Amino acid sequence: MHPSEEELVLYYYGEEDAPPAIADHLAACLECRAAYAVLQRVLNVVETAPAPEPPAGYEARVWKRLVRAAPLPRRAPAARFHPRRWAAAAAMTALLAAAFLAGRWTPRAPQQPTPPAASRVLLLAVGDHLERSQVVLIEVVNRGDLSAEQRRAEDLVGANRLYRNAAVAAGETGLAAVLAELERVLLDIARGPVSPEELERIRRRVEAQGILFKVRVLESEVRHRQAL
Amino acid sequence: MDITDQEAVARTRAGNPDAFRVLVDRHSRALFRLAWRITGDYQDAEDVVQEALLRAYRQLDRFDNRAQFGTWLHRIAANYALDLVRGRRRRAQSADANGGVLAEAPAPDPPPDRQAFGGEVRRRIAGALDELSPSERTAFVLRHFEGLAVEEIAAALGVEPGAARHSIFRAVRKLRRALEPVVAAVY
């Protein structure tokens, strides 16, 4: 019995479910050998069709776009950081410390699937902070004008420090590392006014270190963990 | 940074997103070629690369480190590319149904002396691939160019292995019909 077209395709690709007797059959059957030769030629010629090659430096461009293309809707500027928010952040730190201690000293079920108490409290609080920080970073990268962002960055630096310390205490090392990087940039922005050269240096640093990308991804992860 | 994919994934997971750049540098080009072969469009391919890398980063916790990162990444890209092409087709069909201008007219055969024969063969191949349905084209590209097993293709496309296998069969049959006269002239 002659192999079907499908079986010849399986044989061409070396699939395990190709009938084992095909090779012998092709050696003996002129008709099937001709059919298989056509199939081979067609598939081999498809192989020769080249895909366009991206230009030199493509990888760097991909990385840059990955870092810069924050698909966030442009948001209205966040309200000024009132003393009340400082108080809230400070209260959050106290809460985190308490949760951290509680998590440390309270016996826990051995297979607890949820994050420790300190992490949970931190995650609830830090999402909004990351979102506000992204707004500042996007404005700096896209507009290249620090004047409007200095006050907001100034406010965010203090809160960032509290969250970073809380992250360290809760053992959230990844979060703490990104917050540390973010803090250095926020400090640079808050320090202004700066010369055009200094501004360019800050923008390049934000882009080269992928800070916006990291913050964006981190916020996404935090929101995901909040939902859990 | 000369580290393996597994190490780069582990470092990224440990909170060092810079390690992800190693993976971007290593896989972007191959990802682009895969995306281009599925979409047939340069801009779409670039979009697929960006989206696939972003999705991979966000889903890194779901990646099984015993698997090949490149294969996993290519699956994500193929899946997104398929969605993109399907969406494009739906829009084109909708525009066509409404007498829109997006409907593509079949490409006329150019006179033989207009192009070098190699260029003509490439054009015919591109035309034949364009005639495949999105799922046929994606399954064929993953089997023929990427060398994925049928089960892996099925997992990438979210279908049963039998359906993936039949997409490949249909693709090969259509390609054979379209390209048999071409290869007969070449060989």
Image (cartoon, coloured by chain):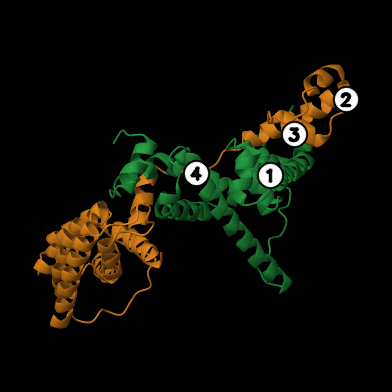
Chain colours: A orange, B green
Secondary structure beneath disc 3?
helix
In space, the residues marked 3 and 4 are separated at their CA atoms by 25 Å
**Chain of the residue that carries numbered disc 1 in the rendered image:** B
Q: Comparing marks 3 and 4, which lies closer to the viewer?
A: 4
Q: Comparing marks 2 and 4, which lies closer to the viewer?
A: 4
Q: Which of the 4 quarters of the picture holds residue A71?
A: bottom left
- Where in the figure is residue A58, as x and y percent of width and height? 39, 46
**Residue position for label 4:** B72
Q: Are marks 3 and 1 in contact (CB under 8 Å)?
A: no
In space, the residues marked 3 and 1 are separated at their CA atoms by 15 Å
In space, the residues marked 2 and 4 are separated at their CA atoms by 41 Å
**Residue position for label 3:** A9
In space, the residues marked 2 and 3 are separated at their CA atoms by 16 Å
Q: Residues within 10 Å of mark 3 (few under 14, many from 20)?
A: many
**Residue position for label 1:** B161
Residue at image x 71%, y 68%? B96
**Residue position for label 2:** A31
Which of marks 1 and 4 precedes in the sequence?
4
Q: Are marks 3 and 4 in contact (CB under 8 Å)?
A: no
Q: Comparing marks 2 and 3, which lies closer to the viewer?
A: 3
Q: Which of the 4 quarters of the picture holds residue A190?
A: bottom left
Establish whether labels 3 and 4 are both on one chain: no
Which of marks 3 and 2 precedes in the sequence?
3
Secondary structure beneath disc 1?
helix
**Amino acid type, callout 3:** Val
Q: Comparing marks 1 and 2, which lies closer to the viewer?
A: 1
Image height check: is A71 above or below A79?
above
**Amino acid type, callout 4:** Trp
